[in-house]
Amino acid sequence: MLVIGAGIVGCATAYYLAGHGFRVTVLERGAIGAEQSSRAWGFVRQQGRHPAEVPLAAAANRLWRGLEAELGQDLEWTASGILVAGETEADAARLEDALRTARDHGLDSRLLTPDAIRAVVPGAPAAWRSGLFTADDGHAEPAKATQAFAAAARARGVVIAERTPVRAILTTGGRATGVVTAVGTFGADAVVLAAGIGAADLARTVGIDLPIQPVRAVVAETNPAGLATQVAVWSPRVAFRPRRSGRLVLGNGYRGIDAEHDLTLGSLRALRLFLPTWVANRRILRLRLGAEFVADLARRLSAEGACQPLAEPRVTHALVRRNAAELYAAFPHLSGLGLARRWAGRIDATPDLIPIIEFAAVPANLLIAAGFNGHGFALAPLVGTLLAEKIAKGRTALDLHAFRLARFRGGTARQDQGAL
């Protein structure tokens, strides 16, 4: 078996495949977890999701609870709940919609009063007038979790070949039978494509058009803050995840600039599908035209460049400063705390903001898991389990119909406006 991509989804899939007795090789164009898997916020949430994702998120949450013991590694797993705070009546209505979805799927979510908010997040600002809280949501450290899956996979005999860029997927008689890499050809009985933002280019080598576009998001980590909570928070203006070190992983609020899309020639692909999503999210998604356009063009004009690791994504420091300022405004006693580091990641986005999990008919034996829209970290243990089940048993325990690629052709793909 071949897995393309050594992010957390690819490493988890390899680990579970090896558990079924398969010999597995993972091919990675760079280093393990070096792209988006090590750059995520680290939230493991069930609440506030597209209704199609909730069953996956709930099943993944159950796996996360035993994952440190199973993998034998400290993942900084913290099951202290996640709070989504609201300030306005519109925020409150959105949280009520999310609560209905949560209850429809049996989640233990509840709306909090201002006093209850300050009980779970001491010192929370008075502006947080409502909150959606799921006590058994949690968070973990993305880099540690990805490396733990890789180490556990290797312990089961999986070979992880870093710095081995895949150029194309091979087919014979309508079946995926291997790949061509920069160092040679690898054969396989099945191929799992879990290559994040690189998945679309590789899928096109076998005639499959994945509507995936990269968006770039910034994250930062503060100096130790001493905030008296282990609850992860997503508010209208700022998001944060407390680490055991006392530092806070810092992201944007849900009404701030969520991400940026660097315009390239590839931006024209699936434009008809992405345009409504951009219009609906135009206040939180910025379009940029600059150095990335030139760099992408140079890559595509080079046979070697097209499959090599991407350069480090650019950090938009103004957005980092804005997020830090919003943290200080919400918690004035943290003013001047300072940032220990800052980084950016490239998220593989789809038009309806839920992933593509496709068991291709042509070519057969190609499994695609991509377009996770920043949700891949939380869902990875469950997605890896399901892909391994499909290969080993020909079926999956959960219905994945909503994630099929054909939804974009059939007009059934819809962004859920109640999802957070």
Image: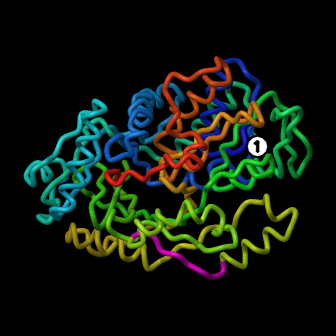
Residue drawn 60% across the image and 61% down it: 213
In the image, taking residue 339 as reference, residue 47 lies left or right, namely left
Question: Label 1 is placed on what type of residue?
Answer: Leu
Residue lying farthest to the left in this orientation: 115
Residue 93 in picture, x, y percent from top left: 19, 55
Residue drawn 73% across the image and 30% down it: 158
Asked whether 290 falls inside the magenta stretch, the response is yes
When asked about the image quadrant of residue 366, the answer is top right
In the image, taking residue 352 as reference, residue 417 lies left or right, namely left
Q: Is residue 344 visible?
A: no
When asked about the image quadrant of residue 169, the answer is top right
In the picture of the structure, the residue carrying the numbered disc 1 is 27
In the image, taking residue 86 as reference, residue 202 lies left or right, namely right
Q: Is residue 104 visible?
A: yes
- Image label count: 1
Residue lying farthest to the bottom in this orientation: 290
Q: Secondary structure at mark 1?
A: strand
Residue drawn 56% across the image and 46% down it: 410
Residue lying farthest to the front in this orientation: 410
Asked whether 236 falls inside the magenta stretch, the response is no
Residue 206 in picture, x, y percent from top left: 80, 46
Quadrant of the drawing holding the N terminus: top right
Residue 109 in picture, x, y percent from top left: 23, 38
Residue drawn 69% across the image and 55% down it: 198
Image: magenta residue range: 284-291
Q: Nearer the viewer, residue 161 or 420?
A: 420
When the figure is inspected, residue 188 is found, relative to residue 39, above or below; the finding is: above
Q: Nearer the viewer, residue 123 or 261?
A: 261
When the figure is inspected, residue 316 is found, relative to residue 141, above or below; the finding is: below
